[in-house]
Image: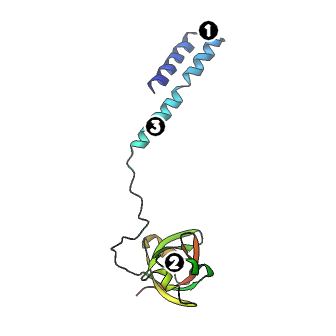
Amino acid sequence: MIVLLSLATAGAVIRALAPNPSTLRDIGTLLLVLWLPAVGNLVAWFIKRIPRKAPPATEFASDAAFAPQLRVRLERTELAASMSPGASAFVVLVGRRGFVARLGAPIGRVLAVPGEQEAMLELLHPAGALPRLGAGTQFHLLVGTQAVAKGRVVGLAS
């Protein structure tokens, strides 16, 4: 950065001392423009120094107790049979928004029963998800990238 600012200063001096229509004055103008990347580098350096807040959690704590927030009706899809039976966390997909959630039991065991069934659902970040998951909202359950079930919100857990 010191080199760029020194070249820009030299360009300003050359531009001031060179005759007006000349190649030397044009070179001074080009050197003078070098202060722009120097200032950009300085701003980037300051931005790197700003402390960042920790990203939100993406998984449930292993020792956290199950605390359901929603009652839902689930119906498995054909892909549910190829799912790993030990999976517990999944994504509730509503339109283009996804919310990490879990059931009280592993999802493979819950979806092993064919047909529609009612279950209790816990959301990892309920403050952001509950306003979008009102009664009657249709959603899909994704385990990894596989849609394993479709469902509908019945209401809040009592």
- Residue 40 in percent (x, y) is at 50, 35
Q: Residues within 10 Å of mark 3 (few under 14, many from 20)?
A: few
Which numbered mark, 1 or 2, is in the foreground of this view? 2
Name the N-terminal-most of marks 3 and 2. Answer: 3
- Checking the image for residue 43, the label placed there is 3
Name the N-terminal-most of marks 1 and 2. Answer: 1
Residue at (41%, 39%) from the top-left corner? 46
Closer to us: 122 or 18: 122
Q: Amino acid at mark 1?
A: Pro
Residue at (41%, 64%) from the top-left corner? 57
Q: Are marks 1 and 2 in contact (CB under 8 Å)?
A: no
Q: CA distance from mark 3 to mark 2?
A: 42 Å
- Residue 28 in percent (x, y) is at 58, 16
Closer to us: 51 or 61: 61
Closer to us: 84 or 3: 84
Q: Is residue 63 above or below residue 77?
A: above
Q: Is residue 154 visible?
A: no
Please give the residue where the numbered disc 2 appears in the rendered image.
133
Q: CA distance from mark 1 to mark 3?
A: 35 Å
Closer to us: 126 or 142: 142
Q: Secondary structure at mark 2?
A: loop
Please give the residue where the numbered disc 1 appears in the rendered image.
19
